[in-house]
Amino acid sequence: MSAENVVDQNIEIGQNSNEKEKLWSKNFTLLWSGQLVSNLGDSVYGTAVKFFLIQLTGSSTLLGILDALMTLPWLFFSMFAGVLADRYDRKRILMLTDFIRGIAVTALGIAALLGILEIWMIMAVGLVLGLCAPFFAPVITSIIPDLVPKSKLIKANSAFTVSSQSVGINGSSLSGILLAVLGAPILFLVNGLSYLFSGFSEKFITIPKHDAESRENHFFEDFKSGVRYVYEFKGLRVQYCFILFLNFFSKIGMIQFVPLFNTMGKLGPVYYGISMSVMSVGMIVGALFVNLLKFEKVERATVYYFGVSAVAVLFVIFAMVGHFVVTGICMFFIGFFIAQNNALGAATIQANVPRNMRGKVSGFRRTMNMALLPLGAIISGFLGEVFPPKLIIAVSYGLAGVVALLLTRSESVRKMFNYENT
């Protein structure tokens, strides 16, 4: 049987097969709360390290290199990490990756407090974060269907979006001010401690273990089975190819956000934080919108297609107009559509893919998502030395919009998104 013919009723939902089970079980709540705290630390750290680096060096090229160091591991390890998620103790993988990241970022903060922080240390920690993330992410994706009923998959993914963006509102809006008041070292420490808290909370989560047959095959045979599954599932194959280029053009524009806001002088970090907060508000509203509506079969794909195209257009408007009010409006709706697309996309994969393939499919997806991001980051850094940031943002997202329009013509992707409601 080909992968595309695997139907929903064949998917094992583990201990949550009873559709009447509640969403907010102990396990889901612990996972959600741990990510809540970790996301708060990430939100503060992301702004702090970017402005710290560009204010220290004035180089957008270094920003591109840092971003490349954090994304290259996704390219090389995501698929292997997905195989591990389908073979080994997922709880241990979660805890180990969170503790490693917590120790690394905490050490960076201590080095900064002691006045011995150097550029290579920031790059090294960026690489550590990049190495841990591809092993952590497929586990989160693969265990959600084991912790919640199938009927609540969209609600569960929306809940993660709401948590991440709720803290994003506070983290992004305050990060610029906190950076000016407290300094980067303290904000680095906040992120390090948030990872440690997340790792500790994961200790108390009960996650169903894989069946014995999940480890019968050789590792690389398991790896090849994941590649074969995606190749045979036409909807996945086509979507991943389009997203490869969609993310490439988006990354070129995204790297230029901090240089663009930095041209606004001392208020640049504050405006950046406010804009990111407005986007977070939009993501919360978008997640709630998806959570409240019951999509009919034909609506799910249409809503996804429209959202992907709208995000590209709104980024072009944001770059070209430049007015603060217009920026706020654009960021709100960008967040709205991103949250909507993320929840629909995640639930679609979880509903179509059986448990023994979720980690591998998630790893393959992230490999494709990230494959061209390091190249995009480096290209953006060099372009930033020649062209104004707003021009780079407008052109790159304009090209992303063209890719999004081509994606809407794929009938196989539409069929995949319009899986039967349960």
Image (tube, grey):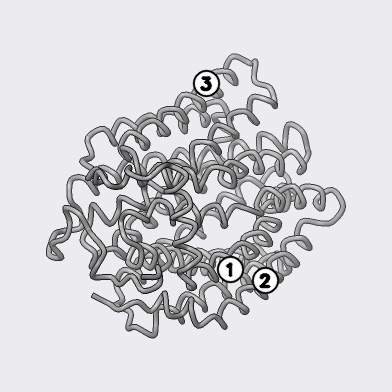
Q: Nearer the viewer, residue 254 or 134?
A: 134
Between disc 1 and disc 3, whose residue precedes?
3
Which of discs 1 and 3 lies nearer the camera? The answer is 3
Residue at 65% across, 73% down: 403
Q: Give the structural element (helix, strand or loop) at label 1.
A: helix
Q: Which residue bears the numbered disc 1?
A: 330
Q: Residues within 10 Å of mark 1 (few under 14, many from 20)?
A: many
Badge 2 element: helix
Which residue occupies 67% across, 75% down? 402
Q: Which mark is residue 107?
A: 3
Q: Earlier in the sequence, mark 1 or mark 2?
A: 2
Mark 1 touching mark 2, by CB under 8 A? yes
In 3D space, how far apart are the residues under numbered discs 1 and 2 (Cα atoms)? 7 Å
Q: As displayed, is residue 86 above or below residue 96? A: below
Residue 272: image location, x then y, percent: 61, 51
Q: Which residue is mark 2?
A: 317
Disc with the residue nearer the chain's start (3 vs 2):
3
Q: Secondary structure at mark 3?
A: helix
Query: What is the x, y in percent for residue 87?
Result: 35, 43
Alpha-carbon distance for marks 3 and 2?
Answer: 41 Å
Residue at figure coordinates x 36%, y 74% from the top left:
5
Quarter holding residue 90:
top left
Q: What amino acid type should be assigned to the residue bearing mark 2?
A: Ile
Q: Is residue 289 left or right of residue 16?
A: right
Asked if residue 332 lies left or right of residue 399, the reply is left
